[in-house]
Image (spheres, rainbow, N blue to C red):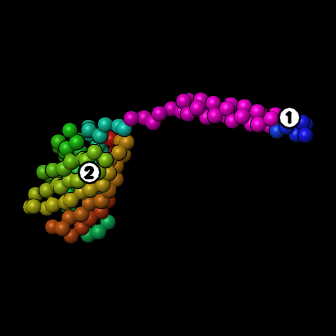
Amino acid sequence: MRFWMLALAATVAASGAWAKSHHGKQRKQAAETPRAASPRDPNGVWNIQSATTVGDCPALIPTSLTLADNKIASAGGAQLQAWGYLDETGNIVARFTGAGEHVARFHGTLKGGRGEGAWSSSTDMCGGTWRAAQE
């Protein structure tokens, strides 16, 4: 009986030592794991590539956008009036108005220097997709 008690005590001691050393390794690994990089500031210039997938539209989507304070400050490429904003989660909503009251609505996401979404024009009965990359 004494043999079994010693064997049980040795097993419990060994498993406790293993658990302690294993727990320490987990802490060390967690401490060595690099933190995720902070989100990239979305303000600045974004280059945009758009494609028309429905209908036939004039150039309603700009080739670039400049964001300042999470709002569209300017749009490059076509002669357009631009309005829009980027919310705290990276969702962008915009409206572009061209000559002759051609209007396109633009929405999607801009995060980590990349973006994508869709656009549509009820005035011209067309729409499509867009992708963006931050300079």
How much space separates mark 1 and mark 2, taking CA atoms?
A: 69 Å
Where residue 36 sits: x, y (%)?
Answer: 45, 36
Callout 1 amino acid: Leu
**Structural crowding at the residue carrying mark 1, measured as other residues with C-alpha within 10 Å and reported as few (<14), some (14–19) or many (≥20):** few
Secondary structure category for the residue under label 1:
helix
The quadrant the C terminus occupies is top left
In reply to whether residue 19 is colored magenta, the answer given is: yes
Where residue 70 sits: x, y (%)?
Answer: 22, 42
Callout 2 amino acid: Ile
Q: Nearer the viewer, residue 25 or 34?
A: 25
- Prevalent SS, magenta region: helix
Query: Residue drawn at (20%, 64%), measured in percent from left and top?
Result: 121
Where residue 102 sits: x, y (%)?
Answer: 14, 61
Q: Is residue 10 above or below residue 114?
A: above
Query: Residue drawn at (29%, 51%), measured in percent from left and top?
Result: 91
| Range shown magenta | 9-38
Where residue 130 sits: x, y (%)?
Answer: 32, 55
- Mark 2 highlights which residue? 92
In reply to whether residue 25 is colored magenta, the answer given is: yes
Q: Nearer the viewer, residue 126 or 114?
A: 114
Question: Left or right: 101 with respect to 17?
Answer: left
- Mark 1 highlights which residue? 6
**Structural crowding at the residue carrying mark 2, measured as other residues with C-alpha within 10 Å and reported as few (<14), some (14–19) or many (≥20):** many
Query: Residue drawn at (19%, 60%), measured in percent from left and top?
Result: 104
Question: Left or right: 115 with respect to 98?
Answer: right
Mark 1 or 2: the one toward you? 1
Image quadrant in which you'd find residue 6: top right
